[in-house]
Image (tube, rainbow, N blue to C red):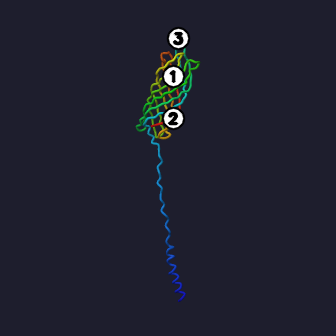
Amino acid sequence: MKIFATTAIATLIGFPALAGGLNTPQPDPVIQQPVLAPVMNTGDWTGGYVGAQLGYGNLNGDGLANVGGNNRVFDSDGDGALGGVYGGYLYQQGNFVYGGELSLNAANLDFDNNLGSIDQLHQLKFKAGYGTQRTLVYGTIGAAYAKGDIAGRSADDFGYEIGAGIDYMVNDRVSIGTEVTYNKFDDFDNTGIDFDTTTIGANVAYRF
């Protein structure tokens, strides 16, 4: 009887501890950190821009040059470098992008056999193309102006240009690209010489 009573008392004393041990501790709640969406390029080509360009061009000329009152056969090719600055403004409606651009270039395009050179080549052109979030593929058409030395005299005149290019947005402010243009001049400044030049170049622009 005494043993039974002792066992009962020990059981009653230990029960609260055993009961407490039956309660499983709950883990602290996990707080989810908010996930920030990455900042994406808006890809809107609308706005103004200025930039710089550097490229290569070739020359093809022919005709009867009037030199000192005498006609002289002019048939010469050539090539050289050119570079300068440009600026314009574009509008975007859906994927259609259009606008205007002025390009000013110093050139070192030399005809073979010391028959002349082109020292300046400028263009005022209309641009239109297809724009996605980062890429713009476009064509151009417009006026071209050239100045240089042809058949022994200084000359300058207007012609026309057509071209094509592609631009890529590095970010919302900077784009890089490449462009090819064909420039044609007939009877350049009444010299009797027709010539054309094809240029290809790389460019970088700051957009605002």
Q: Where is residue 6 in the image (x, y as percent from the top left)?
A: 53, 85
Question: Could you say whether the residue bearing mark 2 is in a helix, strand or loop?
Answer: strand
Of the numbered discs 2 and 3, the one sitting upstream in the chain is 3
Q: In the displayed image of the protein, which residue is found farthest to the right? A: 113
Q: Which residue is disc 1 drawn over?
A: 196
In percent of the image, x 51 and y 29: which residue is there?
84
Q: Do the residues under discs 2 and 3 have CB atoms within 8 angstroms?
A: no
Q: Quadrant of residue 131?
A: top left
Query: Residue, x 53% and y 23% (percent of image)?
Result: 119
Classify 10 Å Cα crowding around label 2: few (below 14), some (14-19), many (20 and above).
many
Contact between labelled residues 1 and 3, with CB atoms less than 8 Å apart: no
Q: Which mark is residue 68?
A: 3
- Amino acid type at circle 1 is Asp
Q: State how far apart marks 1 and 2 are (Cα).
A: 26 Å
Residue 48: x %, y % from top left:
44, 35
Location of residue 58 by image quarter: top right
Q: Where is residue 145 in the image (x, y as percent from the top left)?
A: 47, 23
Name the kind of residue labelled 2 in the image: Val
Location of mark 2 (residue): 204
Between 162 and 40, the one lying in front of the other is: 40
- Secondary structure of the residue carrying tag 1 is strand
Using the image, determine if residue 9 lies above or below residue 54. Answer: below
Give how far across and how far down residue 159 sits, in percent: 46, 22
- Inter-mark Cα distance, 3 to 1: 24 Å
